Amino acid sequence: MLCATSRLLAARAAAASPAQPRARGPAPRCRRRELHFPGHPKLPLCGFLAGRLARLSVPTGRRAILRRGRMPPVVGGGSELRLRKGRCGPQVARALGPDVAAEAAARSPKRPAWGLRRFEAAGWWVSLALVTLLSFATRFHRLDEPRHVCWDETHFGKMGSYYINRTFFFDVHPPLGKMLIGLAGYLSGYDGTFMFQRPGDKYEQHNYMGMRRFCASLGSLLIPFAYLIVLELSKSLPAALLTAALLTFDTGCLTLSQYILLDPILMFFIMAAMLSMVKYNSCADRPFSAPWWFWLSLTGINLAGALGVKFVGLFIILQVGWNTISDLWHLFGDLSLSLVTMGKHLTARILCLIVLPLALYTATYAVHFMVLNKSGPGDGFFSSAFQARLAGNNLHNASIPEHLAYGSVITVKNLRMAIGYLHSHRHLYPEGIGARQQQVTTYLHKDYNNLWIIKKHNTNSDPLDPSFPVEFVRHGDIIRLEHKETSRNLHSHYHEAPLTRKHYQVTGYGINGTGDSNDFWRIEVVNRKFGNRIKVLRSRIRFIHLVTGCVLGSSGKILPKWGWEQVEVTCTPYLKETLNSIWNVEDHINPKLPNISLDVLQPSFPEILLESHMVMIRGNNGLKPNDNEFTSKPWHWPINYQGLRFSGINDTDFRVYLLGNPVVWWLNLLSIALYLLSGSIIAVAVQRGAHLPAEVEGVLWDTLLRLCAWSLASFSLASSIHVLGVLSLVLGTAYSFYLFHPLAYGMVGPLAQDPRSPMAGLRWLESWDF
């Protein structure tokens, strides 16, 4: 079926043919729906579009683009037609034949149209320059204030310092964003010595502005990116300017862009990926050209950037993926393309949108591990083998026996993140908490109370006696673990654990290593056969209690003060393999065994990459707010129900409050509702055979204002009404920004409930606590 342009040109050609009498009506399909506005005759929709939209360009994506001069309000008048590049061009040429198409092209007024296009392009570029200038001006205004740490700057500024000092740390997000913050600080002269301990700490002489400028620059680019995206999609300058205004005057977006945070970096890559995808789509009629390759490759680069900052970058990957699948599906339906060409299209997308992003994403981790080569606060979150590669760690360049033997002094580390080492001390469980025996916990830090001696279960002889041969511990052996400092055995029984119900208590029991059968454990290596030796650092082991059949593990729960706020150790009757119940041997001392360098046990890069992702995933799953931390529900943010204090509480403090511009945010909610309503109406109309102008595929408010202008006024006034409507929205958002800007730029003085406050009367919701 021909598109609307094809049918219109076909009707025009039929009307102009000397061999046929002029048809007084349009094609039957165009007569099926009529539009009627007050003061105008009823018109077929095709005629209405020809008459009432004569001066409006309707370019959208790769659709046909039709421009007309002045025409009578019915199809068949003597008007000039000009066909622009698009999908309908070849269809029109085939439908009308070469003679009619050539005649239409010859009669097209090329020079005036070319001049008009140059004028429009100049207007677009001037508008882009103004939008960019305003964006940078709003984001860099008072950027140096406040001169102290605000909100999450305490985390991401500190992590930037870690990169400068090459100190290893752990975070639940991928490394690219923090790495760029550290690079910006380093290039701007920051030496990485500021501690970023808590919000409110004064920066004093430390050079923090380089990192803030970097984040503000990326946040400033969001507005011109959004302008270009909407301009490319709708070819409507008013729509693009309205989009830029909504982002420029949003206090929430402004606040997030002015501080040392990951949010502006993440939004930059997401918006850049969207812009690259839209530009790449616009080159679809020129596949494999230089611009086509450039935008396709840039899309992949930005996808890697978005995912490399935060895992929520997966959402833009899903967007691009859906666009790619849809594009390939349409290409697959084009029978004019050969299978070889289809293979080229598929290969290009695999290389640019899968291989290239994965390679860049992996490269960021390679740089991350190469830079952070010194021991730091993140060591304990990773395996012992991982820690062996960090300079300054006690395992770095260490030499220890490779295989576990009886009589060895060892430390046992739980593989779940932030659990630590199996630990005991002389303090007993309090009355009413199971048996009143010696406490067994896990502890995150190195300590002499982490040391245990591994012994046979049925003898008290000293395995280190030179007269006894070395006997290695093997998978499936029955052993006893004796605490080195207190000489009590690791013990369990049917008493309930202190915090975790249906789990059994684990204690230290016995005198000088002499206890009972509840001290016996079977040691098993995960996914290994019986009889295999146990390797230090590398073997993943479990301890099965011989009497109760439970598995030694840690619940991750923090004990009360009587347990020194260490982590609870239990024996769980549920035998499912989880990281809570899997351990590895880290320190290993045995004078009867030869030592080997731990360099040979260090993991490879793929193993390090996999482990780091597992630790990040577990860290994200385990994130829980503390009792005194700000919390909100998921539905709070879309409706702007609650804000967040970035800085200050009292009237003497410099206060910054993260809150979206309520006019912009609530207009967004209204837009979603209107979009769903109008989209449903349009879908029904199209299904019933109506032919709609291309403007309805543009930006919502631009479309609604155009439709209202057409219905309320004559053609000569409709354009003015449309511009006035867009201008009203822009000025309304600008005025709301003027009212709420103290929240973003900071304020000192009376609180909002005081009539003297600049925010007096603007606390529209009780939940806004500024």
Image (cartoon, rainbow, N blue to C red):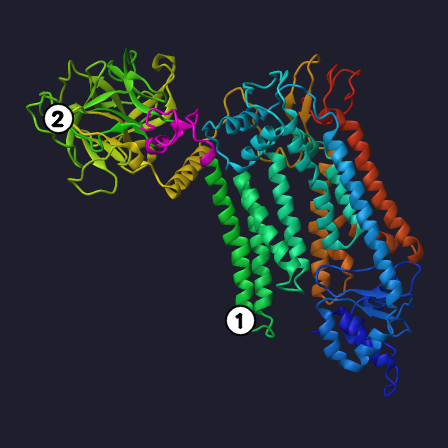
State which quadrant residue 510 falls in. Answer: top left
Q: Nearer the viewer, residue 473 or 654?
A: 473
Q: Taking 664 as reference, is 556 left or right?
A: left
The residue where tag 1 is placed is 340
Question: Considering only vertical position in the picture, is 61 above or below 735?
Answer: below
Q: Assess whether residue 377 is covered by the magenta stretch.
A: yes
Q: Taking 708 as reference, is 325 left or right?
A: left
State which quadrant residue 68 falls in. Answer: bottom right
The residue where tag 2 is placed is 457
Q: Assess whether residue 179 is covered by the magenta stretch.
A: no
Neighbour tally class for label 1: few under 14, some 14-19, many 20 plus, Cα within 10 Å: few
Amino acid found under the numbered disc labelled 1: Val
Q: Which residues are magenta?
A: 370-397
Residue 681 in the image, given as x and y percentages of width and height: 72, 56
Q: How many marks?
A: 2
Neighbour tally class for label 2: few under 14, some 14-19, many 20 plus, Cα within 10 Å: some
